Amino acid sequence: MRLLRVTYRSHNSLIKFSLMKIAHLILAHSDPQQLGRLVNALQNSNAFFFIHIDKKTELDPFRFLEKTDRVYLIKNRVKVAWGAYSIIEATLNGLKEILSSSIGIEYINLLSGADYPLIKAEKIHEFFDEHRDQNFMEYLSVTEEWKEAIPRLTEYHLTNYDFPGKYAAQKWLNRLTSKRKMPNNLIPVGRSQWFSINADAARFILTYLNENPNVVKFFKLTWAPDEILFQTILYNSEFKRNLINDNLRYIDWSAGKASPEILTMSDLTKLRASKALFARKFSMTKHPEIMDQLDIKFKN
């Protein structure tokens, strides 16, 4: 489906209406009320929400979201483990349900339940409307710019599997075997897992993985493949020419921890000055006031 765009002049302003439909694919595992707040902040007549709730989490507390227009809970849920291929599977299941729907989604925005927008929903739609042929994700060369990620690819990781003694098995597997090599001569790139891509790019990712089971097998033995796989597939394809090295997210990694810092009122000035569309991580139970201030910004 092609984008229908209507423009007309009213007095001194130029008003644009976009009928491009955007799907927010949200991965969540907790805090149903905060998730509801995120959905509410992103409400737009052309915004659709496909939400994957970790299969380890009871679904009933999230059922209220289905009463909201254009909200769908992903049916094929996955038990997600940190750093495992299961995060990829949850994302792929979401992409499949989005693209197989009859809605006609043209753009897909991947979020976590701990994210929040930094600008009004209408401005987000306007941005993706103007950049609908581009795909936004953070990608660094693993071999040149992000060398700390090299062992993720050259060593075997059994993170995606659950059996007694798996870490001992992983240790011996790496001692007794040679270094792994990227399948299909792919050039590895990556960093942040969060992205905003058009439906054509999403469709290409699904087709590529379906046609290249060796790539799936390789990344199932990779630690935190969600930070590498999607970028690598698009970077090594014709989509590279429309790939923008920016995931449009404000994320604070300054503490050097495994997870980003939770944003508080002390971050408000930086958030207001940021050109990002979204930020993470937020906690409505610990620091609701920062989200309240962002809501005030939306109203102005």
Image (tube, rainbow, N blue to C red):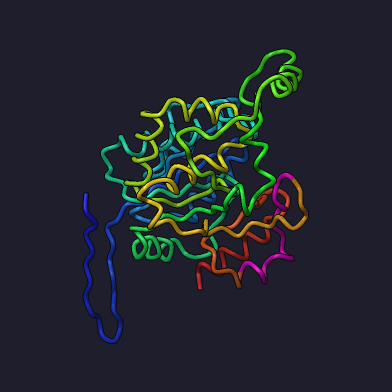
Viewer-proximal residue, 89 or 27?
89
Magenta residue check for 139: no
Q: Which quadrant of the figure has residue 116?
A: bottom right
Q: Residue at x 72, y 13 (%)?
A: 164
Q: Quadrant of residue 35?
A: top right
Q: Please say whether residue 268 is one of the residues in the magenta stretch.
A: yes
Q: Could one spot residue 60 in this view of the protein?
A: no
Relative to 151, is 90 on the left or the right?
A: left
Total numbered badges shown on the rendered structure: 0
Provide residue 191's location: percent of width, then percent of height. 59, 49
Q: Is residue 143 left or right of residue 242?
A: right
Residue extending furthest bottom? 12
- Return the x and y of residue 147 as percentages of the image width and height: 67, 48
Q: Is residue 244 visible?
A: yes
Which of the two residues, 272 or 255, is positioned nearer the viewer here? 255
Which of 215/182 is in front? 182
Locate residue 83: give its quadrant: top right
Looking at the image, residue 208 sits to the left or right of residue 273; the answer is left
| Magenta stretch bounds | 258-271
Residue 268 location (% of width, % of height) = 67, 67
User: Percent from the top left, x then y, of residue 214?
Assistant: 46, 26
- Work out which residue is located at the far front of the displayed protein and give it: 178
* Residue 197 in the image: above or below residue 269: above
Nearest the viewer among 274 and 298 is 274
Rendered residue at 44%/61% (across/down): 121
